[in-house]
Image (cartoon, rainbow, N blue to C red):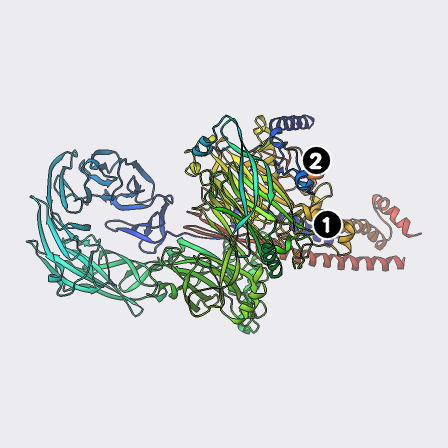
C-alpha cells in the first residue's frame, strides 16, 4: 500500500511539473536557435573622444549611413543609429565636447546626438536652392559661449547654427553670387569667416563675413589667367593651394589682404618627371600631398609662400588627417602595406625627417590593403606620446592598432552583403578518439544530471545559470559536421568589398573568409562581385569531394564590363580556379543539369545576347546539346519597357577565326512591349528555381480537385503609370494604376493581366508554387494593400477527373508538359489591407514542400513578421461553409492580422533590412531563415510547428523516469498479485 | 450566435450589392465572327458585353487625329510572319473598329482577320521548318495607329504544333487602348512534347483571333461597421492555437495514471482483506463489510 501510494505521489509530482507544450518563443529560448550580429559598415569618418573621458570612444560614420559610437578598448558598439538609405552622411564632428554633429542628405539635415548615450538632441532642416558641396565646420574650442556656432555650407547657403539647440542663427545665401564655394575658414580667435571658391574656371573669390551676424564685410576677387581645376586645399589660415587647369603646376593663393597668386611648376619642384597631378583631399596644415605618377609627394609651405618637397613615397601609402598634439605640434600618420604586414609611421609636420613612431603589425592577408587611417594620441606611462590608429581595410573591416598589435577588429564588411548561398557541412566521419568520447560521456552525464535537477525543480540558482549557459553554447549546434536534421549549414555570403565569408548557422561565427584574389587583382579595375551560385554539390561523392560555389563578378560598374568567374571550395575557403572572361555577364542561368562530377551547368548571357556554357568541357557540351532546343530565357529591359524571350540558335557566328563551341547565338522568340506613356516596369519576380512542390492538386471542400498551375517559367510583372512611379502622394488616385501580369517565359503568353485602379508602387512580391503575393499602396484607401493571385490549371482538371485512370496509373501527371499547348488557367485573386510598409517579402521553403507556407515580411521597423499563407487565400469568403471551415478557410476580413507573437525576430531589429533568405532544413517541418541588412539575423522556424520531431526542451529524463516508474509499478503489482494469488490458493 | 450569423449574412449581402459590378465582370474577349472563318472556337465565346477596360489618357496626337464626328473609325494593321530566322513578310491583315469612349479613351473592337494563303515558296519554307522543328514567328506593330509604333511584338511557335488537317492557329492579342502589348500565337489545342513531323493535308489556315483587355482587380473587401467588431474577433480567433482537450494533451500520462490508481484502489481494497486473512478475523466490522463483495466473488 505504502509503496503504491509513493509511486502514485511521485508520478503525480512528475505530472504536475511536466512542461506544457510550447509553440511560441519564451524569453529564455532567445538565442537558442537564433543569432544576431550588429555591424556598422565601412567607416568613412571617425572622430575620437578620449580626452578626460571615462570611457574612451570613437564616433564613426559609415557608407551604410550609420553613425555609431564604438568602445575604443574593445570595439563594441555603445550606440548606433542607422539613417535611411537616402540619408548619406556627409560630415561628422563633435561639438561642445558632448554632442556628435552629423550633416546628412547632401547637407540638408543636421543633427546633434548626445555623446554618452546617442539620444538625439536636436535636428534642423536646412533649406537651399542649388546643389553644392556640403561642408561642416565645428569650432574646435570647447568654450560654451554665444560665439560657438556650427558653420554649415550646403546647397549654396552658409548657415550658422547654434550648437546648443540647433537653431539657425543667421544664414547667407551665395546662390546669387555664382561662386562655387570650396572652403569655409574661420581662423581661430577671429570674428571673420572666409568663404573662398572659384567662379567659372579662372576667377578666384574670397568673401569675408562677420561671424556674429553673417554680414558681408568684404569681397576680394582676382582672375588667375591659367585657370583652376578641381579641389582647393587649405594649407594655413590664409593660404589655399590649387592646381592650374593643365594640372601641371601648383598655385598657392593668399587671400588675407588682397589676393596674391603664386605659381610653381610641379616639374621644377619634384624634378624632371611630369604628368597630371591630383591633390589629396586631406586636412593638413602647412603641408599638403600631391599624387603624381604613382607617387605621393609631400610639399610643405614655408613662410613666404615658398613650396618645398619634403618627401616622396609610393602611392600605396595611406595618409591620415593631421592630429594636433598638446604642444601645438601637428602629427600625421602614414600607413604602408607590405609582405603581410602594415607599417604605421607617425611624423611631425614641422620635423618631417624624424619619425615619432614606427610600428609594424602582422595582418591577415585576407584583409587586403589599407583604405583609410585615423589616428589618435595618448600619453604613455613614461609621459611620451603614444599613438593609436584606426584602420579601415579593403574588405571594409575596422582595426585598432596600438603598440604594434591589433587591439580589436570588426568584420564590418558583413554589413553590405550582396548575395547569399548555403553549403552543407562535411559528413561526420568515424574514428573519434576514445578520450574524447569519455570526456564527452562525462560531460553528457553531468549535463543530463543538471537538466534532470532542473526538471525536478531541485536546481539551485547557480545550476539554473549553468543549464542556461549549456543550452546556449551547446557544442552540438556549432559542430563542424552535418547533422541529421540539416540545421547545421554554412552560409556563404559575398560582400560588396568582394570578400566571401562562411558563417556557421549554429552560432554565426565566421568559419573562413576569403578576399577573392581574382576580383582584387590589378588587371581588373573597380571590380564588383555580383552573386553566388552553387557550382558543385556532391551527393554521390559526399565523403571525398568538397562542394564548391561559383562567384560571378565583373570588372567595372557598367554592364558591358568583362566578367570574372571564381570557384571556391566551401569547406576550406580556398579559391580552386578563376577565369577572367572576354565577354560581359548580364545574366547567369543555372541549368538543371549536372555532369558526371556533379558540376552544375551554367549558361552566361552577355550584353549582345550570346550565351556561353560553363564548365567548358566536352561532357558539358554533350549534355547541353541534348537539351539544346529546350533552353529558353527571358530578359527584362525596364528602361524601354520591353520583355523579350530568347532561344538558342547555334554556335556563335563570330568574326573571330577560332570557332568557340561553348558560345551560342540566340534569337528573339517573343516580345512584350509595354506602352511607354502608361506603363513602366517596377517589379519582376519569378519562382525560386529550387523550390519543391509536394502536391500538385488541391482537394477543395466539395470534394472537387483543383490542379495547381505549377510552372517554373512564370514571371510576375508589375507596371505603374510613369507619372505615379514616384513617391506616394505625388499622383492622384485617378491618374495612378497598377497592372500586374503573369507571363509564361517560354512562349511569352500572358496568362493573366489585371489592373488595380488608384494604386501605385513600390511593389514587393513573392512567387511560390502557383501563387503570387504582392504588396502595393492603394491611394484611394490611403493604405497599403496586399493581393494574392492563385493560378489553377483547368485543362488538366478536365483530363484527370477520371478516377479510374488515376487508379490504373494512366493519368498524365508525370508526362512531359509542353508549354506550346494552349493552357486554360483559372485565376483567383483577392486583396486585403496590410498596415505595414514592407521592405522585403519572402516565403518559407521546406525540403519536401509538405509543410504549409508562411510569408516572411520585412517591415519598416526592420523586423521580420511571419504571416500564414492561409490568410492570403483567394477562396476566403465572409461566411465559409462548415466544409470550407474544415478545409481551413478563414472567414474573410478586410485586413491581414498582425499578431505580435509572430515576429520571427522577436525583440530584435535587423537594421537596414534588405532581404530575407529561406533555406529548407532536412527536417521537413523546419525552414532556416537568414535576414540581412546592416545587421544579420538567423533563426529557424517551423510554420506548422515541429510536427515531425520532439521539441528542444522535451524532457527525456521525465520520459525515462515515467517508464522506469511504470516498470517498477508493474513489477510491484505483479509481485503483490502473485502473493495474493498464493494466499488465495492457500485459502 | 444567431445575431452574429445574421450580421454576417447582412454584410455579405451588402458586400455583394456593393461589389456586384466587379464580381459579375466577365472577360471581355472578343471573338472574330465565326461565320467568316467557320471555326470551332465556340469555347472561348463570351457575351460581348461592355468592355471593362480602363481608359488611359490617349496620346494627344492620336486623339486629335480621331476627333472627327464619327466616334468609330476603321483601322487596319498587318500581321507579318517569318520562317525560322528569315525576314518578316506580310501574312495577313487585321481590320478593327476603333471605338472612342466618352472620356477620350480608345478601344479596339470588332476585330477581323484575313489571312493570306501560303505561296508555294512559303509552303516550301514551312515544310523545311517542319522538318527542322524550327520556329514559325509572327509579329504585330505595338501601336495600331502609327505602325509600327515603338517596336513590334513578336510571338513564335514551333512549326510542328500548327498542322492538323489544315493549319490551325490561335492568336490572342493583348491590347491597351491603341497599343498592342503582346500577341500570343500558337495552336488552338495541345502540342505534346516530342513533336511529331506531320505535313498538313491542306495548306489553308484556320484562324482564331481573340482580343484581350485588362481585367479589373477585385477590390479589397471593406467592412465598414464591422472593422471594430468582426475584424478583431476573427483575428483573435485565429491567433489562438487550436485548443486541445486535456485528454488529447496528456493521454500518455493519464492512461498509466489511471492504471496506477486502479491498481492502488484494488490494493487498498485488498489490504484490509489481507490483514483480515493474516490476523484471523477482522476486528473492524466496516472493513469486513467493505471487503465483502469481492471476496464473495472469489469464493465462487
- What's the mark number on residue A334? none
- Pointer 2 indicates a residue of which chain? A
Residue at the far front: name it.
B120
Which residue, given by chain and number where applicable, does mark 1 sit on? A800
Image coordinates of residue A585 in percent, x first then y, are 43, 59
SS for tag 1?
A: helix
Tell me which residue sits at (23%, 50%) in the image.
Answer: A51
Q: To which residue does mark 2 refer?
A: A881
Residue A339 location in percent, x, y? 30, 70
Q: Residue at x 88, y 50 (%)?
A: B295
Secondary-structure class at tag 2: loop
Q: Is residue A566 above or below residue A43?
A: below
Residues packed near mark 1 inside 10 Å, few (<14), some (14 to 19) or many (20 plus) = some
x, y (%) of residue B283? 84, 47
Please state if B244 lies on the left or on the right of A383 as rendered: right
Front-most of B62 and B246? B62
Residue at (62% x, 33% y) in the render: B25
Asked if residue A139 can be seen in this view, the reply is: no
Which chain hosts label 1?
A
Label 2, label 1: how far apart the Cα atoms are: 27 Å
Between residue A194 and residue A735, name the one nearer to us. A735
- Label whose residue precedes the other's in the sequence (2 or 1): 1
Q: Is residue A770 visible?
A: yes
Q: Nearer the viewer, mark 2 or mark 1?
A: 1
Residue B218: image location, x then y, percent: 58, 34
Q: Quadrant of the C terminus of chain A?
A: bottom right
Position of A810 relative to A80 (above/below): below
Amino acid at each position: 500500500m505504502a509503496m503504491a501510494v509513493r509511486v502514485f505521489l511521485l508520478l503525480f509530482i512528475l505530472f504536475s511539473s511536466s512542461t506544457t507544450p510550447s509553440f511560441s518563443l519564451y524569453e529564455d529560448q532567445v538565442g537558442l536557435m537564433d543569432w544576431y550580429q550588429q555591424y556598422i559598415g565601412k567607416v568613412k569618418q571617425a572622430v575620437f573622444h578620449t580626452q578626460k573621458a571615462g570611457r574612451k570612444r570613437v564616433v564613426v560614420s559609415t557608407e551604410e549611413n550609420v553613425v555609431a559610437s564604438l568602445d575604443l578598448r574593445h570595439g563594441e558598439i555603445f550606440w548606433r543609429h542607422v539613417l535611411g538609405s537616402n540619408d548619406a552622411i556627409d560630415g561628422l564632428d563633435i561639438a561642445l565636447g558632448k554632442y556628435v554633429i552629423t550633416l546628412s542628405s547632401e547637407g540638408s539635415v543636421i543633427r546633434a546626438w548626445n555623446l554618452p548615450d546617442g539620444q538625439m538632441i536636436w535636428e534642423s532642416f536646412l533649406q537651399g536652392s542649388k546643389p553644392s558641396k556640403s561642408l561642416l565646420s565645428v569650432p574646435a574650442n570647447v568654450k560654451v559661449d554665444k560665439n560657438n556656432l556650427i558653420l554649415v555650407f550646403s546647397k549654396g547657403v552658409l548657415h550658422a547654427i547654434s550648437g546648443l539647440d540647433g537653431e539657425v542663427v543667421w544664414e547667407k545665401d551665395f546662390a546669387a553670387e555664382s561662386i562655387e564655394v570650396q572652403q569655409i575658414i574661420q581662423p581661430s580667435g577671429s570674428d571673420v569667416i572666409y568663404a573662398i571658391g572659384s567662379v567659372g574656371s579662372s576667377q578666384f573669390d574670397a568673401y569675408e563675413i562677420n561671424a556674429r551676424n553673417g554680414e558681408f564685410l568684404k569681397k576680394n576677387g582676382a582672375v588667375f589667367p591659367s585657370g583652376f581645376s578641381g579641389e582647393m586645399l587649405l594649407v594655413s589660415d590664409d593660404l589655399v593651394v590649387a592646381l592650374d587647369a593643365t594640372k601641371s603646376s601648383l598655385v598657392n593663393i593668399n587671400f588675407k589682404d588682397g589676393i596674391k597668386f603664386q605659381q610653381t611648376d610641379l616639374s621644377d619642384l619634384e624634378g624632371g618627371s611630369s604628368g597630371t597631378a591630383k591633390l589629396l583631399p586631406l586636412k593638413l596644415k602647412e603641408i599638403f600631398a600631391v599624387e603624381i605618377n604613382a607617387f605621393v609627394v609631400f610639399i610643405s609651405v614655408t613662410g613666404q609662400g615658398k613650396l618645398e618637397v619634403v618627401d616622396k613615397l609610393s602611392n600605396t601609402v595611406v595618409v591620415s588627417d593631421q592630429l594636433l598634439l598638446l604642444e601645438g605640434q601637428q602629427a600625421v600618420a602614414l600607413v604602408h602595406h607590405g609582405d603581410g604586414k602594415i607599417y604605421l609611421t607617425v611624423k611631425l609636420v614641422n620635423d618631417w625627417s624624424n619619425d615619432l613612431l614606427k610600428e609594424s603589425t602582422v595582418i591577415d592577408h585576407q584583409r587586403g590593403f589599407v583604405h583609410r587611417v585615423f589616428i589618435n594620441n595618448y600619453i604613455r606611462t613614461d609621459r611620451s606620446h603614444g599613438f593609436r590608429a584606426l584602420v579601415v581595410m579593403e574588405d571594409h573591416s575596422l582595426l585598432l592598432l596600438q603598440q604594434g598589435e591589433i587591439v580589436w577588429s570588426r568584420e564590418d564588411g558583413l554589413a553590405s552583403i550582396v548575395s547569399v548561398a548555403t553549403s552543407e557541412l562535411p559528413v561526420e566521419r568515424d574514428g573519434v578518439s576514445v578520450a574524447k568520447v569519455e570526456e564527452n560521456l562525462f560531460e553528457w552525464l553531468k549535463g543530463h544530471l543538471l537538466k534532470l535537477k532542473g526538471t525536478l525543480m531541485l536546481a539551485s540558482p547557480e545550476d539554473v545559470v549553468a543549464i542556461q549557459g549549456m543550452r546556449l553554447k551547446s557544442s552540438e549546434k556549432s559542430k563542424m559536421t552535418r547533422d541529421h536534421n540539416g540545421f547545421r549549414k554554412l552560409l556563404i555570403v559575398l560582400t560588396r568589398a568582394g570578400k566571401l565569408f562562411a558563417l556557421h548557422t549554429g552560432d554565426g561565427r565566421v568559419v573562413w573568409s576569403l578576399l577573392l584574389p581574382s576580383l582584387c587583382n590589378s588587371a581588373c579595375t573597380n571590380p564588383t562581385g555580383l552573386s553566388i551560385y552553387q557550382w558543385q554539390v556532391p551527393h554521390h561523392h559526399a565523403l571525398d569531394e568538397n562542394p564548391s560555389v561559383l562567384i560571378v563578378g565583373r570588372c567595372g560598374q557598367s554592364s558591358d564590363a568583362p566578367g570574372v568567374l571564381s570557384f571556391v571550395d566551401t569547406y576550406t575557403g580556398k579559391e580552386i580556379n578563376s577565369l577572367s572572361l572576354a565577354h560581359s555577364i548580364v545574366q547567369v542561368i543555372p541549368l538543371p543539369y549536372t555532369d558526371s562530377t556533379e558540376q552544375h551547368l551554367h549558361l552566361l548571357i552577355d550584353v549582345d545576347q550570346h550565351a556561353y556554357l560553363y564548365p567548358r568541357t566536352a561532357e558539358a557540351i554533350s549534355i547541353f546539346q541534348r537539351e539544346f532546343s529546350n533552353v529558353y530565357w527571358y530578359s527584362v529591359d525596364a528602361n524601354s519597357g520591353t520583355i523579350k524571350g530568347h532561344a538558342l540558335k547555334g554556335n556563335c557566328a563570330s568574326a573571330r577565326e577560332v570557332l568557340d563551341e561553348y558560345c551560342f547565338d540566340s534569337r528573339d522568340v517573343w516580345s512584350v512591349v509595354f506602352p511607354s506613356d502608361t506603363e513602366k516596369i517596377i517589379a519582376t519576380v519569378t519562382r525560386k528555381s529550387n523550390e519543391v512542390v509536394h502536391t500538385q492538386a488541391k482537394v477543395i471542400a466539395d470534394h472537387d480537385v483543383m490542379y495547381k498551375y505549377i510552372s517554373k517559367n512564370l514571371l510576375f510583372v508589375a507596371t505603374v503609370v510613369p507619372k505615379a512611379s514616384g513617391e506616394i502622394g505625388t499622383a492622384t488616385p485617378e491618374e495612378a494604376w497598377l497592372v500586374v501580369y503573369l507571363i509564361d517565359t517560354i512562349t511569352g503568353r500572358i496568362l493573366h493581366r489585371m489592373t488595380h485602379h488608384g494604386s501605385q508602387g513600390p511593389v514587393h512580391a513573392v512567387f511560390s508554387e502557383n501563387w503570387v503575393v504582392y504588396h502595393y499602396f492603394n491611394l484611394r484607401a490611403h493604405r497599403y494593400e496586399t493581393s494574392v493571385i492563385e493560378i489553377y490549371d483547368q485543362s488538366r482538371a478536365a483530363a484527370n477527373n477520371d478516377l479510374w485512370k488515376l487508379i490504373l496509373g494512366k493519368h498524365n501527371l508525370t508526362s512531359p508538359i509542353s508549354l506550346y499547348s494552349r493552357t486554360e488557367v483559372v485565376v483567383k485573386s483577392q486583396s486585403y489591407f496590410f498596415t505595414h510598409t514592407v521592405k522585403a517579402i519572402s516565403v518559407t521553403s521546406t525540403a519536401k514542400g509538405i509543410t504549409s507556407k508562411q510569408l516572411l515580411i520585412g517591415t519598416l521597423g526592420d523586423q521580420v513578421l511571419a504571416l500564414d499563407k492561409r490568410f492570403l487565400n483567394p477562396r476566403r469568403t465572409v461566411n465559409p461553409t462548415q466544409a470550407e471551415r474544415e478545409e481551413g478557410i478563414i472567414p474573410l476580413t478586410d485586413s491581414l492580422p498582425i499578431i505580435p507573437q509572430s515576429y520571427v525576430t522577436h525583440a530584435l531589429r535587423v537594421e537596414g533590412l534588405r532581404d530575407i533568405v529561406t533555406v529548407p532544413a532536412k527536417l521537413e517541418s523546419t525552414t532556416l531563415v537568414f535576414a540581412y541588412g546592416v545587421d544579420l539575423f538567423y533563426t529557424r522556424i517551423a510554420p506548422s510547428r515541429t510536427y515531425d520531431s520532439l521539441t528542444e526542451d522535451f524532457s527525456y529524463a521525465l520520459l525515462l523516469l515515467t517508464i522506469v516508474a511504470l516498470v517498477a509499478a508493474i513489477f510491484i503489482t505483479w509481485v503483490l498479485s502473485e502473493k495474493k494469488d498464493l494466499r488465495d490458493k492457500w485459502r | 450566435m444567431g445575431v452574429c450569423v445574421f450580421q454576417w449574412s447582412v454584410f455579405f449581402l451588402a458586400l455583394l450589392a456593393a461589389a456586384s459590378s466587379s464580381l459579375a465582370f466577365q472577360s471581355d474577349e472578343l471573338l472574330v465572327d465565326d461565320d467568316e472563318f467557320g471555326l470551332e472556337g465556340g469555347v472561348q465565346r463570351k457575351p460581348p458585353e461592355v468592355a471593362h477596360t480602363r481608359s488611359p489618357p490617349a496620346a494627344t496626337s492620336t486623339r486629335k487625329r480621331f476627333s472627327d464626328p464619327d466616334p468609330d473609325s476603321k483601322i487596319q494593321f498587318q500581321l507579318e510572319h517569318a520562317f525560322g530566322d528569315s525576314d518578316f513578310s506580310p501574312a495577313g491583315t487585321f481590320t478593327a473598329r476603333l471605338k472612342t469612349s466618352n472620356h477620350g479613351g480608345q478601344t479596339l473592337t470588332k476585330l477581323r482577320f484575313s489571312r493570306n494563303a501560303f505561296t508555294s515558296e512559303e509552303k516550301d519554307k514551312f515544310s523545311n521548318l517542319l522538318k527542322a522543328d524550327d520556329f514559325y514567328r509572327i509579329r504585330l506593330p505595338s501601336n495600331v495607329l502609327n505602325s509600327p509604333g515603338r517596336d513590334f511584338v513578336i510571338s513564335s511557335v514551333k512549326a510542328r504544333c500548327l498542322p492538323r488537317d489544315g493549319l490551325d492557329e490561335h492568336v490572342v492579342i493583348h491590347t491597351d487602348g491603341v497599343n498592342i502589348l503582346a500577341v500570343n500565337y500558337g495552336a488552338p489545342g495541345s502540342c505534346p512534347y516530342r513533336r511529331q513531323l506531320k505535313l498538313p493535308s491542306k495548306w489553308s489556315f484556320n484562324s482564331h483571333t481573340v482580343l484581350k483587355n485588362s481585367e479589373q482587380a477585385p477590390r479589397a473587401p471593406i467592412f465598414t461597421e464591422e472593422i471594430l467588431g468582426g475584424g478583431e474577433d476573427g483575428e483573435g480567433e485565429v491567433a489562438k492555437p487550436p485548443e486541445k482537450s486535456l485528454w488529447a494533451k496528456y493521454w500518455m500520462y493519464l492512461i498509466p495514471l489511471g492504471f496506477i490508481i486502479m491498481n492502488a484502489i484494488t490494493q487498498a481494497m485488498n489490504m484490509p482483506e489481507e490483514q483480515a486473512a493474516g490476523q484471523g478475523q477482522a476486528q473492524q466490522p466496516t472493513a469486513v463489510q467493505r471487503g465483502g463483495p469481492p471476496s464473495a466473488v472469489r469464493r465462487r
